[in-house]
């Protein structure tokens, strides 16, 4: 049944594109949203349409029309209703949060007169509403408490934590400056990942990282067996101060890139990269240390700066050998949080320059909140659960 429905949906989308070209995207999104909400209702009820089961929570009860304003225009959706239970599609709410946050970022530029381009037509398409100071205030009042509650929610026990930062352009004191956006991702012992928090600060100085990590700790973050990050000095100092004694894994991808700066000849770069990979891919720590010592000796004369750098730094990327082999591929790099940051960048670049720090934090929070909810509801775990090892 599901296969037939998917085929019908796919054919409907193809027909729309064939008939209307890019003008059909609005209708395609409408089809996808309606289909996603129906599927969500079926999962919630524990039964598909016309399916008989004793475990179902309630019954489908038709649809209710609702207009949703999005970046591709207004969508006339059909919201699935239920009987004998309370249901509202979370897929709809997740999309609305980030749309509102993005709309607010652009709306604030318009209202405060800081935009250098004609944004009137853009805001109407992106946000679906006329821009005024009262509209902005109303939306802020609706959205900010929800996002603040999520940022301040209690945390618990996690096995691994990934830390990273990226920069967004924010107007501050009449100037446009780069402000640091901090993010943290945790992995539970059941293998599920979750965004722990997000924050916006003036820079990656130790004082700002310490404040971010201290906030995570106050919210109950504990049980961390390993931190994974790059080697930014502010982050390293803050991590040691707030979470002393917890092992640290330096991202192996960053180490590979850093090593290339010390290779004296272009012709040597490929071989150096292969030698470092062999160290990282060793079966255990004993073999990794043997290969590291061998590689250090190999380049001692031909590339003394590289040899010295490797002796000091490569070992920081070998902490993973103290952890279960099935987990190592996921904790050897910061890939999980870098993918999160790429999604943030993809969405924030529409706003270009944020009018203030709160506007930036609002949109970033909405994005990572949606990503975190998606991760937690995924059937496939990010890594094997501890009890399965």
Image (spheres, rainbow, N blue to C red):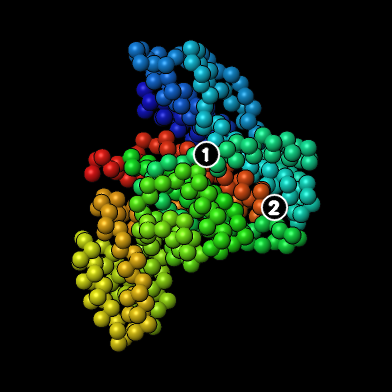
Pick whichever of labels 1 and 2 is earlier in the sequence.
1
* Among the 4 quarters of the image, the one containing residue 181: bottom right
**Quarter of the figure that contains the N terminus:** top left
Residue at 24 percent of width and 75 percent of height: 293
Residue at the bottom extreme? Answer: 301
Instruction: Please state the horizontal and vertical placement of residue 158, each as a whole percent of the image.
Output: 38, 45
* Labels 1 and 2 touching (C-beta < 8 A): no
The label shown at residue 356 is 2
Q: What residue sits right under mark 1 in the picture? A: 153
In the figure, is residue 288 to the left or right of 160? left
Query: The residue tagged with tag 2: helix, strand or loop?
Result: loop
- Name above or below for residue 336 compared with residue 58: below
Closer to viewer: mark 1 or mark 2: 1
**Quarter of the figure that contains the C terminus:** top left
Residue at 66 percent of width and 62 percent of height: 177
Residue at 51 percent of width and 32 percent of height: 91
- Name above or below for residue 318 compared with residue 185: below
Instruction: Please state the horizontal and vertical placement of residue 160, each as a whole percent of the image.
Output: 37, 50
Instruction: Please state the horizontal and vertical placement of residue 288, each as a whole percent of the image.
Output: 24, 67
């Amino acid at each position: 049944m599901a296969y037939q429905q998917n085929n019908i949906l796919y054919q409907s989308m193809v027909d729309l594109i064939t008939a209307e070209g890019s003008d059909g995207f609005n209708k395609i999104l409408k089809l996808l949203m309606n289909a996603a909400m129906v599927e969500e209702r079926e999962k919630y009820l524990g039964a598909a349409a016309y399916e008989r089961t004793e475990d179902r929570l309630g019954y489908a009860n038709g649809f209710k029309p609702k207009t949703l304003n999005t970046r591709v225009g207004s969508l006339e959706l059909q919201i699935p209703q239920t009987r004998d239970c309370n249901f509202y599609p979370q897929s709809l709410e997740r999309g609305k949060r980030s749309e509102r946050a993005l709309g607010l970022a652009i709306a604030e530029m318009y209202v405060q007169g800081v935009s250098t381009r004609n944004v009137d037509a853009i805001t109407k398409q992106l946000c679906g509403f006329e821009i005024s100071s009262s509209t902005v205030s109303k939306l802020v009042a609706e959205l900010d408490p929800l996002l603040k509650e999520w940022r301040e929610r209690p945390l618990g026990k996690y096995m691994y934590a990934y830390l990273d930062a990226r920069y967004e352009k924010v107007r501050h004191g009449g100037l446009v400056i780069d402000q640091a956006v901090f993010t943290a991702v945790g992995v539970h012992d059941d293998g599920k990942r979750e965004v722990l928090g997000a924050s916006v600060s003036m820079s990656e100085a130790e004082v700002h990282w310490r404040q971010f990590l201290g906030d995570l700790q106050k919210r109950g973050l504990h049980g961390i067996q390993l931190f994974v990050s790059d080697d930014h000095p502010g982050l390293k100092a803050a991590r040691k101060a707030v979470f002393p004694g917890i092992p640290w894994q330096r991202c192996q991808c960053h180490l590979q890139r850093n090593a290339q700066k010390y290779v004296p000849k272009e012709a040597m770069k490929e071989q150096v990269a292969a030698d470092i990979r062999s160290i990282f891919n060793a079966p255990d720590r004993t073999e990794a240390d043997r290969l590291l010592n061998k590689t250090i000796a190999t380049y001692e004369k031909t590339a003394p700066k590289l040899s010295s750098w490797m002796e000091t730094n490569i070992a920081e990327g070998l902490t993973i050998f103290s952890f279960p082999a099935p987990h190592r591929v996921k904790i050897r790099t910061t890939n999980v949080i870098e993918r999160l940051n790429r999604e943030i960048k993809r969405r924030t670049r529409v706003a270009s320059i944020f009018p203030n720090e709160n506007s930036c934090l609002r949109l970033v929070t909405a994005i990572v909140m949606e990503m975190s909810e998606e991760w937690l509801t995924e059937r496939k775990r990010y890594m094997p659960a501890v009890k399965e090892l």
